[in-house]
Amino acid sequence: MKYSFTYSILLLGLLMMGCSSDDAMMVDDEEEVVYTNGSADFSTFVALGNSLTAGYSDGALSLQGQEASLPYILSEQFSLVGGGEFTQPLVSDNLGGMTLGGQQILDNRLILSFASGSPAPVNVSGMPSTEVSSVLSGGFNNMGVPGAKIFHLGVEGYGNVGGLLNGTANPYFVRFASSANASIMADAMAQSPTFFSLWIGNNDILSYAIAGGAGENQAGNLDPTTYGSNDITDPNVFAAVYNGLLQILTSGGAKGVVANIPDITTIPYFTTVPYNPVPLDATTAGMLNAAFANYNAGLQQMQSYGFITMDEMNARTIVYSEGASNAMLIEDEDLTDLTAYGIPNYRLTTANDLIVLTAQNIIGTTVNEDPTLINGVSVPLSDQWVLTPQEQQMVATAQTSFNATIDALATNYGLAMVDVEGVMDMLANGGITVNGSTLTSTYATGGAFSLDGVHPSSRGYAYLANEFIAAINATYGSDLPGVNPIDYTALYLE
């Protein structure tokens, strides 16, 4: 038996809205408006953060993404009140991938393709021309480094090409670090910023979540040098490092804007793939139920012995039925370990589980081309494809703590603070109307997110830029104008 599970990207009419970035913004050439900077000095603006600052979108860092990055949009508005040149470590093309020694090490960006007859995200074809080891010269105002966690910003050698193989360096920073021993913070401060943005901390929970919880919660471990790449950062480490970053950034009198961390359950990476996508006919459902009969009987025996509760027995019982909406078989490490009795940690997914976006590429595929071994049906999905309620709670606890730190320190340092969490909540719950167009977090057609399901589209970044501008105006008494998000691309088509 062979199953094909398709998560349709609907409504071609919606897809065609905002699918080109070539249209120039129209400017009403009438009376010139003079804007003021208030108490802020935007002459040297430096932006620090991760992929959300770099302009990462559609699963890669491309020229198109960098030209619509959040800080670049801000810098254009700052230029109206004395803001200076804003330089970025530009990649070489719009493919988005990168090579190291001529070998491609980072994938090309995603684009919506109709080649198969129905819209589907695919990687743009072609060999990228951005070589990681070709180091750029000069200082840069956009210091966003995709993949960086909060404690990476101060690490010397994070841009050393020799550290790529052992994971101590970051290929994006390797491209523009001032030296092999430089740190992101040192290079940022070398610009002598008069104004800064700091949006960091997303990866301190997101890497764990995207990996389906295949990492460790490091709460209580104060040594980040011992963390794995997919681990959750300890809240005390986060608070100490964040405070240290602000001390350095404000040491010369610079003002700035910070942003908090969104709830991961509001982004399409975790809300697009349903928990119950398995279609079964009566015959197949019967065959599967017969195959799991001994497993279910073993659970009943374990419950009768008192090894598991009745509730856990019911939660672990595998029963399929005829229909289009069967739950998926998964392996859950948080279940009571009964492997010593020959009973694996299997259960069916529920509405409380979050299935990661990339799981759609494996659900329904066969193992070794054996038609009886179907991933998510007769073969359980492993931990990396599902974020269970217990794993979600660990992420939520860390996020709440991180955001409390950001809010308190923004107040202590007198900085503007952007509630990105609130913005993402609105996008996920009805959307936000902008100039007659509604932005939502719906995958592909919502307009706010790119095809990787995590990062905003150019239009989404433009909307966030307006939120940053509003916070800056409210804090520093400036009257910077916003931009029209509808002038920015929502989706790129092939």
Image: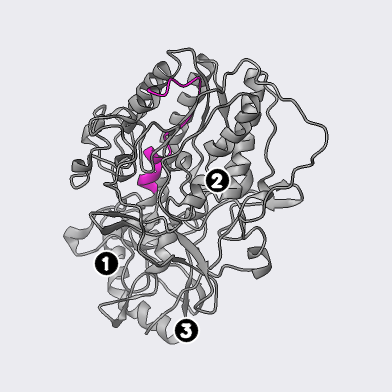
Q: Which of the two residues, 16 or 28, is positioned nearer the viewer here?
A: 28
Asked if residue 208 is among those painted magenta in the image, a careful observer would answer yes
The amino acid pointed to by label 1 is Gly
Q: Which of the two residues, 217 or 62, is positioned nearer the viewer here?
A: 62
For the record, the magenta segment spans 190-209
* Residue 213 point in image, percent of width and height: 34, 49
Asked if residue 256 is among those painted magenta in the image, a careful observer would answer no
Point out the tag, 3 or 2, that comes first from the N-terminus.
Answer: 2
Residue located at (41% from left, 48% from top): 91
Q: Which of the two residues, 291 or 79, is positioned nearer the viewer here?
A: 79
User: Can you identify the residue that label 3 sits on?
Assistant: 281
Point out the tag, 1 or 3, that comes first from the N-terminus.
Answer: 3
86 sits to left or right of 180: right
Q: Is residue 230 above or below residue 3?
A: above
* Residue 379 point in image, percent of width and height: 31, 71
276 sits to left or right of 234: right
At label 1, counting other C-alpha atoms closer than 10 Å, the crowd grade (few under 14, some 14-19, many 20 or more) is some
SS for dot 1: helix
Tally the marks.
3
Residue located at (39% from left, 31% from top): 139
Q: Which mark is residue 298?
A: 1
The amino acid pointed to by label 2 is Ala
User: Can you identify the residue that label 2 sits on?
Assistant: 68
Residue located at (39% from left, 70% from top): 363
At label 3, counting other C-alpha atoms closer than 10 Å, the crowd grade (few under 14, some 14-19, many 20 or more) is few
* Residue 368 point in image, percent of width and height: 25, 78
Q: Is residue 357 above or below residue 379?
A: above
Indicate the quadrant where residue 4 lies.
bottom left
Indicate the quadrant where residue 127 lies.
bottom left
